[in-house]
Image: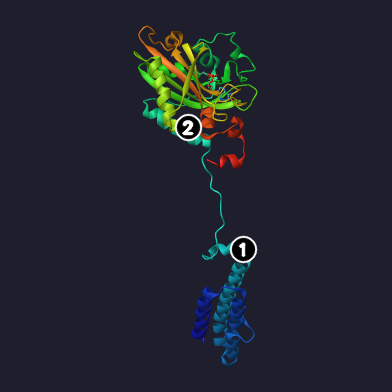
Amino acid sequence: MKEQLSNILREAQQIYFQIKNLEELENFRIKFLGRNGLLAQISDSFRNLSLEERKEIGKYFNFVKEEINKLYLEKKEILTSPQKIIFDLSHPGIRKDRGIKHILTQEIEEIKKIFFTLGFNIEEGREIVTEEENFDSLNIPPNHPSRDLWDTFWLNKKNYLLRTHTSAHQVEFLRKYGVPIKFTIIGKVYRHEATDQRHEMQFHQIEGVSVGEKSNLVELKSIFKIFFEKYFNKKIDIFFRTSYFPFTEPSLEVDINCFLCQSKGCQLCKKSGYLEVAGAGMIHPFVLRQASINSEKYFGYAFGLGLERLIMLKYDIPDVRLFHSTDLRFINQF
Ligand code: FA5
Protein backbone atom coordinates (compact mmCIF):
# COMPACT_ATOMS: atom_id res chain seq x y z
CA MET A 1 0.00 0.00 0.00
CA LYS A 2 2.94 2.30 0.78
CA GLU A 3 4.20 1.67 -2.75
CA GLN A 4 0.78 2.52 -4.18
CA LEU A 5 0.82 5.77 -2.26
CA SER A 6 4.30 6.73 -3.48
CA ASN A 7 3.22 5.96 -7.08
CA ILE A 8 0.26 8.29 -6.62
CA LEU A 9 2.54 11.04 -5.30
CA ARG A 10 5.01 10.63 -8.20
CA GLU A 11 2.18 10.76 -10.75
CA ALA A 12 0.80 13.92 -9.12
CA GLN A 13 4.25 15.54 -9.26
CA GLN A 14 4.57 14.74 -12.98
CA ILE A 15 1.11 16.04 -13.87
CA TYR A 16 1.74 19.19 -11.82
CA PHE A 17 4.27 20.42 -14.44
CA GLN A 18 1.84 19.88 -17.33
CA ILE A 19 -1.06 21.89 -15.86
CA LYS A 20 -1.56 25.10 -17.91
CA ASN A 21 -4.96 26.38 -16.84
CA LEU A 22 -7.55 26.29 -14.09
CA GLU A 23 -9.62 23.64 -15.84
CA GLU A 24 -6.68 21.24 -15.88
CA LEU A 25 -6.00 22.10 -12.25
CA GLU A 26 -9.57 21.21 -11.27
CA ASN A 27 -9.20 17.81 -13.03
CA PHE A 28 -6.00 17.34 -11.02
CA ARG A 29 -7.84 18.04 -7.79
CA ILE A 30 -10.69 15.68 -8.63
CA LYS A 31 -8.31 12.89 -9.70
CA PHE A 32 -6.14 12.97 -6.57
CA LEU A 33 -7.99 14.80 -3.82
CA GLY A 34 -11.68 14.43 -4.84
CA ARG A 35 -14.30 12.47 -2.91
CA ASN A 36 -13.88 9.54 -5.29
CA GLY A 37 -10.25 10.33 -6.13
CA LEU A 38 -7.22 8.06 -5.88
CA LEU A 39 -6.47 8.96 -2.26
CA ALA A 40 -10.08 8.46 -1.16
CA GLN A 41 -10.16 5.05 -2.87
CA ILE A 42 -7.00 3.91 -1.13
CA SER A 43 -8.16 5.10 2.27
CA ASP A 44 -11.22 2.85 1.90
CA SER A 45 -8.97 -0.21 2.02
CA PHE A 46 -7.52 0.85 5.42
CA ARG A 47 -10.46 -0.99 7.02
CA ASN A 48 -8.84 -4.34 6.32
CA LEU A 49 -5.59 -3.40 8.13
CA SER A 50 -4.65 -4.10 11.73
CA LEU A 51 -4.52 -1.21 14.19
CA GLU A 52 -0.69 -1.20 14.12
CA GLU A 53 -0.56 -1.21 10.28
CA ARG A 54 -3.26 1.43 10.07
CA LYS A 55 -1.23 3.72 12.35
CA GLU A 56 1.90 3.39 10.24
CA ILE A 57 0.31 3.66 6.80
CA GLY A 58 -1.98 6.45 8.06
CA LYS A 59 1.05 8.63 8.75
CA TYR A 60 2.39 8.13 5.23
CA PHE A 61 -1.07 8.64 3.75
CA ASN A 62 -1.33 12.01 5.50
CA PHE A 63 2.12 13.00 4.24
CA VAL A 64 1.19 12.15 0.58
CA LYS A 65 -2.14 13.94 0.85
CA GLU A 66 -0.47 17.03 2.25
CA GLU A 67 2.19 17.05 -0.51
CA ILE A 68 -0.44 16.75 -3.26
CA ASN A 69 -2.51 19.46 -1.61
CA LYS A 70 0.56 21.73 -1.56
CA LEU A 71 1.09 21.10 -5.28
CA TYR A 72 -2.52 22.00 -5.92
CA LEU A 73 -2.37 25.26 -3.93
CA GLU A 74 0.99 26.27 -5.42
CA LYS A 75 -0.27 25.84 -8.99
CA LYS A 76 -3.49 27.67 -8.12
CA GLU A 77 -1.49 30.69 -6.93
CA ILE A 78 0.66 30.67 -10.08
CA LEU A 79 -2.36 30.53 -12.36
CA THR A 80 -4.31 33.24 -10.56
CA SER A 81 -1.54 35.73 -9.70
CA PRO A 82 -0.43 37.98 -12.63
CA GLN A 83 3.23 38.38 -11.46
CA LYS A 84 3.87 34.70 -11.75
CA ILE A 85 3.15 34.84 -15.48
CA ILE A 86 6.77 35.96 -15.99
CA PHE A 87 7.68 32.28 -15.82
CA ASP A 88 5.65 31.66 -18.95
CA LEU A 89 8.31 31.95 -21.64
CA SER A 90 5.72 32.40 -24.39
CA HIS A 91 4.26 35.50 -22.69
CA PRO A 92 5.16 38.79 -24.47
CA GLY A 93 7.69 40.91 -22.47
CA ILE A 94 7.01 44.23 -20.76
CA ARG A 95 8.86 47.06 -22.53
CA LYS A 96 11.14 48.98 -20.15
CA ASP A 97 12.66 52.33 -21.14
CA ARG A 98 16.46 52.37 -20.96
CA GLY A 99 18.30 55.41 -19.65
CA ILE A 100 20.72 57.24 -21.96
CA LYS A 101 23.61 59.59 -21.36
CA HIS A 102 22.51 63.22 -21.39
CA ILE A 103 23.56 65.09 -24.53
CA LEU A 104 25.94 67.25 -22.45
CA THR A 105 27.75 64.15 -21.15
CA GLN A 106 27.96 62.65 -24.64
CA GLU A 107 29.42 65.82 -26.14
CA ILE A 108 31.89 66.35 -23.27
CA GLU A 109 33.27 62.86 -23.94
CA GLU A 110 33.57 63.66 -27.66
CA ILE A 111 35.29 67.01 -27.05
CA LYS A 112 37.74 65.52 -24.54
CA LYS A 113 38.77 62.97 -27.19
CA ILE A 114 39.38 65.70 -29.79
CA PHE A 115 41.54 67.84 -27.48
CA PHE A 116 43.41 64.77 -26.30
CA THR A 117 44.36 63.97 -29.92
CA LEU A 118 45.50 67.61 -30.30
CA GLY A 119 47.96 67.05 -27.43
CA PHE A 120 46.07 68.68 -24.51
CA ASN A 121 45.98 67.16 -21.00
CA ILE A 122 42.41 66.94 -19.69
CA GLU A 123 41.58 68.54 -16.30
CA GLU A 124 38.37 69.35 -14.43
CA GLY A 125 39.24 71.68 -11.57
CA ARG A 126 36.63 72.45 -8.90
CA GLU A 127 33.32 74.27 -9.00
CA ILE A 128 34.09 76.14 -5.75
CA VAL A 129 37.14 78.41 -6.02
CA THR A 130 38.61 81.36 -4.18
CA GLU A 131 38.28 85.00 -5.14
CA GLU A 132 42.01 84.97 -5.74
CA GLU A 133 41.78 82.10 -8.25
CA ASN A 134 38.74 83.43 -10.09
CA PHE A 135 39.78 87.11 -10.23
CA ASP A 136 43.08 88.33 -8.67
CA SER A 137 45.34 85.74 -10.31
CA LEU A 138 43.84 86.73 -13.66
CA ASN A 139 44.55 90.44 -13.40
CA ILE A 140 40.89 91.26 -12.72
CA PRO A 141 41.01 94.27 -10.39
CA PRO A 142 38.94 94.51 -7.16
CA ASN A 143 36.58 97.10 -8.65
CA HIS A 144 35.86 95.08 -11.83
CA PRO A 145 32.10 94.73 -12.49
CA SER A 146 32.29 90.92 -12.85
CA ARG A 147 32.92 90.73 -9.08
CA ASP A 148 29.55 92.30 -8.58
CA LEU A 149 26.82 90.40 -6.71
CA TRP A 150 24.75 90.32 -9.85
CA ASP A 151 27.38 88.40 -11.83
CA THR A 152 28.82 86.08 -9.22
CA PHE A 153 27.38 83.52 -6.81
CA TRP A 154 29.30 84.25 -3.61
CA LEU A 155 29.31 81.61 -0.88
CA ASN A 156 28.77 82.31 2.81
CA LYS A 157 32.38 81.41 3.53
CA LYS A 158 34.35 84.62 2.95
CA ASN A 159 36.27 84.83 -0.37
CA TYR A 160 34.72 81.66 -1.80
CA LEU A 161 32.47 81.56 -4.88
CA LEU A 162 31.10 79.28 -7.61
CA ARG A 163 33.62 79.69 -10.43
CA THR A 164 32.35 82.08 -13.09
CA HIS A 165 34.74 80.68 -15.69
CA THR A 166 37.17 77.79 -16.09
CA SER A 167 39.98 80.36 -16.46
CA ALA A 168 40.00 80.27 -12.63
CA HIS A 169 42.35 77.26 -12.86
CA GLN A 170 44.84 78.64 -15.39
CA VAL A 171 47.47 79.62 -12.82
CA GLU A 172 46.89 76.51 -10.68
CA PHE A 173 47.65 74.06 -13.52
CA LEU A 174 50.48 76.18 -14.93
CA ARG A 175 52.09 76.00 -11.48
CA LYS A 176 51.40 72.29 -11.22
CA TYR A 177 52.82 71.29 -14.62
CA GLY A 178 55.41 73.96 -15.38
CA VAL A 179 56.22 74.82 -19.02
CA PRO A 180 55.96 73.92 -21.86
CA ILE A 181 52.41 72.59 -21.37
CA LYS A 182 49.02 72.23 -23.07
CA PHE A 183 45.91 71.44 -21.05
CA THR A 184 42.13 71.84 -21.09
CA ILE A 185 39.73 72.24 -18.19
CA ILE A 186 36.14 71.13 -18.83
CA GLY A 187 33.32 71.70 -16.38
CA LYS A 188 30.37 73.66 -15.04
CA VAL A 189 30.54 77.39 -14.38
CA TYR A 190 27.99 79.70 -12.77
CA ARG A 191 26.87 83.26 -13.47
CA HIS A 192 24.28 85.17 -11.53
CA GLU A 193 22.50 86.59 -14.54
CA ALA A 194 19.09 86.71 -16.21
CA THR A 195 18.47 83.78 -18.54
CA ASP A 196 17.38 83.95 -22.17
CA GLN A 197 17.72 81.85 -25.35
CA ARG A 198 21.54 82.07 -25.21
CA HIS A 199 22.25 82.61 -21.51
CA GLU A 200 21.93 80.18 -18.60
CA MET A 201 22.97 80.67 -14.97
CA GLN A 202 24.76 77.33 -15.03
CA PHE A 203 26.61 76.22 -18.16
CA HIS A 204 29.79 74.44 -19.21
CA GLN A 205 33.08 75.84 -20.45
CA ILE A 206 36.07 74.24 -22.10
CA GLU A 207 39.23 76.11 -21.26
CA GLY A 208 42.32 75.55 -23.38
CA VAL A 209 45.78 76.73 -22.33
CA SER A 210 49.06 76.32 -24.18
CA VAL A 211 52.36 77.83 -22.99
CA GLY A 212 55.71 77.38 -24.67
CA GLU A 213 58.54 79.35 -26.23
CA LYS A 214 56.72 79.52 -29.56
CA SER A 215 53.02 79.59 -28.70
CA ASN A 216 51.33 82.26 -30.81
CA LEU A 217 48.03 83.49 -32.23
CA VAL A 218 48.45 81.61 -35.52
CA GLU A 219 48.62 78.34 -33.60
CA LEU A 220 45.56 79.37 -31.58
CA LYS A 221 43.62 80.01 -34.80
CA SER A 222 44.65 76.63 -36.24
CA ILE A 223 43.57 74.87 -33.04
CA PHE A 224 40.12 76.47 -33.42
CA LYS A 225 39.98 75.51 -37.10
CA ILE A 226 40.94 71.88 -36.48
CA PHE A 227 38.71 71.58 -33.43
CA PHE A 228 35.61 72.98 -35.17
CA GLU A 229 36.11 70.83 -38.26
CA LYS A 230 36.50 67.69 -36.17
CA TYR A 231 33.60 68.56 -33.87
CA PHE A 232 31.10 69.64 -36.55
CA ASN A 233 32.50 67.20 -39.11
CA LYS A 234 32.47 69.88 -41.83
CA LYS A 235 34.24 73.11 -42.81
CA ILE A 236 33.13 76.01 -40.62
CA ASP A 237 33.45 79.77 -41.16
CA ILE A 238 35.06 81.19 -38.04
CA PHE A 239 35.15 84.91 -37.27
CA PHE A 240 37.68 86.43 -34.90
CA ARG A 241 36.77 89.80 -33.37
CA THR A 242 39.09 91.86 -31.21
CA SER A 243 37.85 92.09 -27.65
CA TYR A 244 39.01 92.69 -24.09
CA PHE A 245 39.78 90.33 -21.20
CA PRO A 246 42.09 91.51 -18.39
CA PHE A 247 43.98 88.18 -18.55
CA THR A 248 44.78 88.15 -22.30
CA GLU A 249 46.50 90.65 -24.56
CA PRO A 250 45.53 90.82 -27.36
CA SER A 251 42.06 89.39 -26.73
CA LEU A 252 39.60 87.89 -29.21
CA GLU A 253 36.05 86.72 -29.39
CA VAL A 254 35.18 83.85 -31.69
CA ASP A 255 31.92 83.71 -33.65
CA ILE A 256 30.28 81.14 -35.92
CA ASN A 257 27.39 81.59 -38.40
CA CYS A 258 23.98 81.47 -36.72
CA PHE A 259 22.31 78.17 -37.67
CA LEU A 260 18.80 79.36 -36.89
CA CYS A 261 18.58 82.17 -39.46
CA GLN A 262 21.51 81.14 -41.71
CA SER A 263 23.14 84.47 -40.78
CA LYS A 264 20.15 86.52 -41.90
CA GLY A 265 19.63 87.85 -38.37
CA CYS A 266 17.20 86.51 -35.77
CA GLN A 267 16.36 86.70 -32.07
CA LEU A 268 18.93 84.01 -31.14
CA CYS A 269 21.87 85.89 -32.70
CA LYS A 270 20.38 89.29 -31.80
CA LYS A 271 20.10 90.07 -35.54
CA SER A 272 23.89 89.91 -35.96
CA GLY A 273 23.95 86.69 -38.02
CA TYR A 274 26.66 85.23 -35.75
CA LEU A 275 26.83 83.39 -32.43
CA GLU A 276 29.68 83.99 -30.03
CA VAL A 277 31.14 80.66 -28.96
CA ALA A 278 34.44 81.53 -27.26
CA GLY A 279 36.70 84.12 -25.73
CA ALA A 280 40.44 83.79 -26.37
CA GLY A 281 43.78 85.56 -26.60
CA MET A 282 47.48 85.56 -25.77
CA ILE A 283 47.96 85.03 -22.03
CA HIS A 284 48.82 88.29 -20.25
CA PRO A 285 52.40 88.33 -18.85
CA PHE A 286 50.84 89.15 -15.44
CA VAL A 287 49.16 85.71 -15.41
CA LEU A 288 52.36 83.90 -16.43
CA ARG A 289 54.22 85.65 -13.61
CA GLN A 290 51.54 84.48 -11.11
CA ALA A 291 52.62 80.94 -12.04
CA SER A 292 56.32 81.89 -11.69
CA ILE A 293 56.85 81.55 -15.45
CA ASN A 294 59.45 83.74 -17.17
CA SER A 295 57.19 85.95 -19.31
CA GLU A 296 60.15 87.19 -21.38
CA LYS A 297 60.91 83.68 -22.57
CA TYR A 298 57.54 81.93 -22.61
CA PHE A 299 54.30 82.87 -24.37
CA GLY A 300 50.90 81.31 -24.13
CA TYR A 301 47.46 81.38 -25.64
CA ALA A 302 44.20 80.51 -23.90
CA PHE A 303 40.57 80.15 -24.90
CA GLY A 304 37.23 79.50 -23.20
CA LEU A 305 34.53 77.82 -25.29
CA GLY A 306 30.86 77.70 -24.23
CA LEU A 307 29.86 74.05 -24.51
CA GLU A 308 26.08 74.57 -24.73
CA ARG A 309 26.49 77.07 -27.59
CA LEU A 310 28.54 74.51 -29.55
CA ILE A 311 25.92 71.81 -29.06
CA MET A 312 23.16 74.24 -30.03
CA LEU A 313 24.98 74.89 -33.31
CA LYS A 314 25.66 71.21 -33.96
CA TYR A 315 22.08 70.01 -33.35
CA ASP A 316 20.05 73.14 -34.21
CA ILE A 317 18.84 73.63 -30.64
CA PRO A 318 17.16 77.04 -30.46
CA ASP A 319 17.22 77.63 -26.66
CA VAL A 320 19.99 76.96 -24.12
CA ARG A 321 17.43 76.49 -21.33
CA LEU A 322 16.34 73.18 -22.88
CA PHE A 323 19.53 71.50 -21.63
CA HIS A 324 18.46 71.67 -18.01
CA SER A 325 14.78 71.13 -18.63
CA THR A 326 13.50 67.71 -17.65
CA ASP A 327 11.59 67.42 -20.92
CA LEU A 328 12.08 63.82 -22.04
CA ARG A 329 11.00 64.71 -25.59
CA PHE A 330 14.15 66.85 -25.78
CA ILE A 331 16.50 64.50 -23.90
CA ASN A 332 15.50 61.31 -25.73
CA GLN A 333 16.28 62.79 -29.15
CA PHE A 334 20.01 62.25 -28.72
C1 FA5 B 1 35.12 83.91 -20.42
O1 FA5 B 1 34.47 83.26 -19.58
C2 FA5 B 1 36.61 83.84 -20.47
N1 FA5 B 1 37.10 83.16 -19.30
C3 FA5 B 1 37.02 83.13 -21.75
C4 FA5 B 1 38.49 83.23 -22.01
C5 FA5 B 1 39.31 82.18 -21.66
C6 FA5 B 1 39.02 84.36 -22.61
C7 FA5 B 1 40.68 82.27 -21.89
C8 FA5 B 1 40.37 84.45 -22.88
C9 FA5 B 1 41.21 83.40 -22.51
P1 FA5 B 1 33.00 84.77 -21.69
O2 FA5 B 1 32.34 85.36 -20.52
O3 FA5 B 1 32.86 85.50 -22.97
O4 FA5 B 1 34.56 84.58 -21.43
O5 FA5 B 1 32.47 83.27 -21.89
C10 FA5 B 1 33.05 82.38 -22.82
C11 FA5 B 1 31.97 81.65 -23.58
O6 FA5 B 1 31.05 81.03 -22.68
C12 FA5 B 1 31.10 82.55 -24.43
O7 FA5 B 1 31.70 82.77 -25.68
C13 FA5 B 1 29.84 81.75 -24.57
O8 FA5 B 1 29.98 80.75 -25.57
C14 FA5 B 1 29.75 81.05 -23.24
N2 FA5 B 1 28.83 81.73 -22.33
C15 FA5 B 1 29.06 82.88 -21.65
N3 FA5 B 1 28.03 83.21 -20.87
C16 FA5 B 1 27.12 82.24 -21.04
C17 FA5 B 1 25.82 81.97 -20.49
N4 FA5 B 1 25.27 82.76 -19.58
N5 FA5 B 1 25.13 80.87 -20.91
C18 FA5 B 1 25.69 80.03 -21.81
N6 FA5 B 1 26.91 80.20 -22.36
C19 FA5 B 1 27.61 81.28 -21.99
Can residue 83 be seen from the camera position used here?
yes
Disc marking residue 82: 1
- Check the image and tell me how it is coloured: rainbow
- 110 or 187, nearer to the observer: 110
Location of residue 305 in the rendering, given as x and y in whole percent from the top left corner: 49, 23
Pointer 2 residue: 108
- The amino acid at mark 1 is Pro
Label 1 secondary element: helix
> Disc 1 or disc 2, which is closer to the eye?
2
Q: Residue furthest top?
A: 296
State the image quarter where residue 99 is shown: top right
- Give left or right: position of 35 versus 227: right
Label 1 and label 2: CA atoms lie apart by: 44 Å
Say above or below: 38 vs 236: below
Q: Position of residue 261 (x, y in %)?
A: 57, 29
The residue nearer to you, when weighing 168 against 47, is 168
**Residue visible at 57% across and 33% down in the picture:** 317
* Residue type indicated by callout 2: Ile
Where on the picture, by quarter, is residue 214? Answer: top left
Q: How many marks?
A: 2
* Quadrant of res 284: top left
The answer to whether one can see residue 176 in this image is no
Label 2 near ligand 1 (CB < 8 Å) = no
In the displayed structure, 143 sits above or below 196; it is above
Residue 324 vs residue 272, the one in the foreground: 272
- Residue 191 spot, x, y in % from top left: 60, 22
Residue 316 in the image: x percent, y percent? 55, 34
Determine the residue positioned at 53% across, 47% down. Answer: 98
